[in-house]
Image (tube, rainbow, N blue to C red):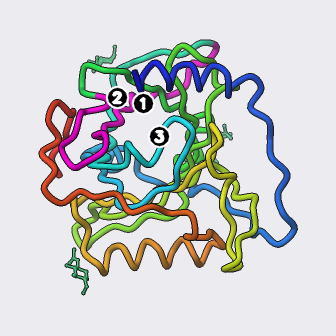
Amino acid sequence: MRVLHFLAASAVGALPLVKPVVADDCKTVTPLSDVDLTEFLRATWYTQQQQVVKFQSTDDLYCVAATYALENRTVPFFDGLVISVYNYATEDEVNGEPQNTADGMVLCARLEDANITGKLAVSPCWLPNIAAAPYWIVAIHADDDGKYDWAVISGGQPTELQDDGGCTTSTGSYAGGLWIFSRDPVASNQTLADAQAAAVDLGISLAELNDVPQDGCTYDGALIKPN
Ligand SMILES: *[C@@H]1O[C@H](CO)[C@@H](O)[C@H](O)[C@H]1NC(C)=O
Ligand SMILES: *[C@@H]1O[C@H](CO)[C@@H](O)[C@H](O)[C@H]1NC(C)=O
Ligand SMILES: *[C@@H]1O[C@H](CO)[C@@H](O)[C@H](O)[C@H]1NC(C)=O
């Protein structure tokens, strides 16, 4: 059901994907240009905190995992790099009803400018890039072995000034969003604090973030790439 809801939401929300007005006091946020996508796609990312987006309500914010893969998928009117996106979550509780298993819906992330590897756009694969939502890797960290261990993803430029002086994308819209990813299913407090601090440095507000429980998750049915 949720998948259908997502499809409907994407189709409706995509037409047209209007550029929201940016509040005066919001810092300009830009995607990173030098993300190593091979490393980024190597292993599953576990969402530690995220904003609610229209296709993912707070009911679905359990055991959220994102796995990316190169599978030669194609999208309309585009011959650049397309990355398969497997978004997993469980409903209502840790290990609740799985929302999108490995054989469920796959989204397509498109790299529109090969020189800006942190700038992707995501939507169902049958939609053209113009209807895809911005997915910007705005901060990322590599450990001593060069393996990424956390990342901050913004659904485009934050536009709405919050009381803490930072900005969020518009909450609950089809595009937008903020995700704090970790390679460990349960991030250490230090990892979470580092990722949050990086977001705040960029002028991004944490005010609308929800905690995503991962402790005890078994990821039944999910496509998982081990770290
Ligand atoms: C993608 O296409 C390339 C070139 O045709 C091929 O070598 C590779 O095996 C394909 N990968 C997958 C996952 O299908
Ligand atoms: C990417 O960068 C290279 C080298 O700087 C440049 O030649 C090329 O035109 C750029 N490509 C795009 C799509 O901007
Ligand atoms: C983070 O800190 C809290 C409070 O000190 C502690 O209860 C929790 O277990 C810590 N989380 C992790 C993942 O270490």
Using the image, tell me which numbered label, if any, was put on residue 173.
none
Discs 3/2, front = 3
* Mark 1 secondary-structure assignment: strand
User: How many angstroms separate mark 3 from mark 2 (CA)?
Assistant: 24 Å
Discs 3/1, front = 3
Q: Which residues are magenta?
A: 77-100
| Residue 1 versus residue 18 in the image, above or below | above
Query: As shown in the figure, which amino acid type bears the numbered disc 1?
Result: Ile
* Mark 3 secondary-structure assignment: loop
Residue occupying image coordinates x 30% and y 53%: 46
> Residue 41 in the image: x percent, y percent?
33, 43
Tags 1 and 2 in contact by the CB under 8 Å rule?
A: yes
Q: Quadrant of the N terminus?
A: top left
**Magenta-span inclusion, residue 81:** yes
Which residue bears the numbered disc 2? 70
Tags 3 and 2 in contact by the CB under 8 Å rule?
A: no
Few, some or many C-alpha atoms within 10 Å of disc 1 (few <14, some 14-19, many ≥20)?
many
Few, some or many C-alpha atoms within 10 Å of disc 3 (few <14, some 14-19, many ≥20)?
some
Using the image, tell me which numbered label, if any, was put on residue 83.
1
| Quadrant of res 37 | top left
> Residue 27 in the image: x percent, y percent?
75, 69
> Residue 36 in the image: x percent, y percent?
41, 51
Judge: label 2 CB < 8 Å from ligand 1.
yes
| Residue 132 versus residue 173 in the image, above or below | above
| Quadrant of res 161 | bottom right
